[in-house]
Image: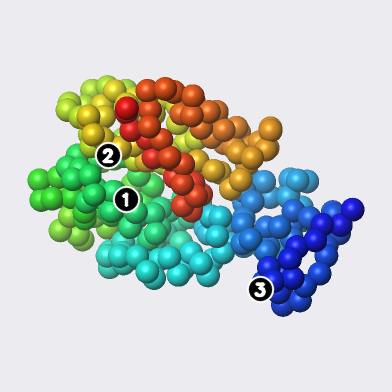
Amino acid sequence: MPISFSAEKVAGVLGTPGSFPAEKEMGTFYKILGVRPNLRESRGNANFGFFKEFPMPDEKLGFVSEALDNYCVDHSTPASTICNEIETYTRKSVEQSMMLTGPLEGAFLKFLIRLTGAKRVLEFGTYTGYSALSMAEALPSDGKVVTLDIDPKNTAIAKEFWSCSDHGKKIQLILGDAVETVRLLEGQFDLVFIDADKPGYIKYLDAALAKLSVKGVIAVDNTLFSGEVLQKSPPSENGRAIAAFNERVRTDPKLDTVLLPIRDGLYLIRKR
């Protein structure tokens, strides 16, 4: 049976109203709403074959159209010149550039820091350093970002860019096992940003909670994972890991939470 959409909705995107055959139901749905399925691990998967008709670049993840995403960026506090340079370089020269935090989420993290008065930030997953620098820029002069990673190649890029910023001195990079590193860190953190390997999210959350200050906030990226969380059995290992993480958070009575559809999903978590 064909599925129909309102003439207004269809006309607004495709120019003409109409109905669409059932086999293209999901493709049409994604096209009309500007939603993207998982482009990281599902290319070629039979469940996503329809999406070849509507290709979108890998580095643009999220649940709104690119035009709306750009509109949001244009109406948010702009990124610094150096953050823009990190973004440009990463998209042109670094593999898996979809991992970049980007200007909208970077602005959101800055807003969180200024809203909460955070002074100490812990980050799981550095990549090329965009998010670490964004957060450092929002911290007071005596603030600090401790960022954890295992990749010396990409973090070397990050350090080069940080060295060009007056805020780079607020950032401490530590390479090695994140959970073991956190156990050795002294003091508490007011904001924790988790954006690392997805199967590790639960253990990173547990490590972060042990170091979280009384009014601290944890922000966890990619928690909608391009819509895979809606499927009973997500097709990718990362999708299954995110679904398990989300359920772990949802069922913990000791946590206050809100899951936001910012880019690929951002879960905000604090202790009750």
How much space separates mark 1 and mark 2, taking CA atoms? 9 Å
**Kind of residue at disc 3:** Gly
Q: Earlier in the sequence, mark 3 or mark 1?
A: 3
Determine whether, in the image, residue 253 is placed left or right of residue 54.
left
Where residue 181 sits in the image (x, y, percent)? 28, 27
**Kind of residue at disc 2:** Leu
Camera-side residue of 238 and 244: 244
Name the residue at the left extreme.
142
The answer, for residue 168, to whether it is visible in the render is: no
How much space separates mark 2 and mark 3, taking CA atoms? 40 Å
Where residue 111 sits in the image (x, y, percent)? 28, 53
**Kind of residue at disc 1:** Leu
Label 2 crowding class (10 Å Cα cut-off): few <14, some 14-19, many 20+? Answer: many
Callout 3–callout 1 Cβ contact below 8 Å: no
**In the structure shown, which secondary structural element does the residue marked by tag 2 occupy?**
strand
Where residue 206 sits in the image (x, y, percent)? 37, 24
Callout 1–callout 2 Cβ contact below 8 Å: yes
Circle nearer the viewer, 3 or 1:
3
Residue at (30% x, 65% y) in the render: 77
Circle nearer the viewer, 2 or 3:
3
Q: Label 1 belongs to which residue? A: 109
How much space separates mark 3 and mark 1, taking CA atoms? 33 Å
Callout 2–callout 3 Cβ contact below 8 Å: no
Label 1 crowding class (10 Å Cα cut-off): few <14, some 14-19, many 20+? Answer: many
Q: Quadrant of the image for the C terminus?
A: top left
**Quadrant position of residue 243:** top right
Q: Label 2 belongs to which residue? A: 191
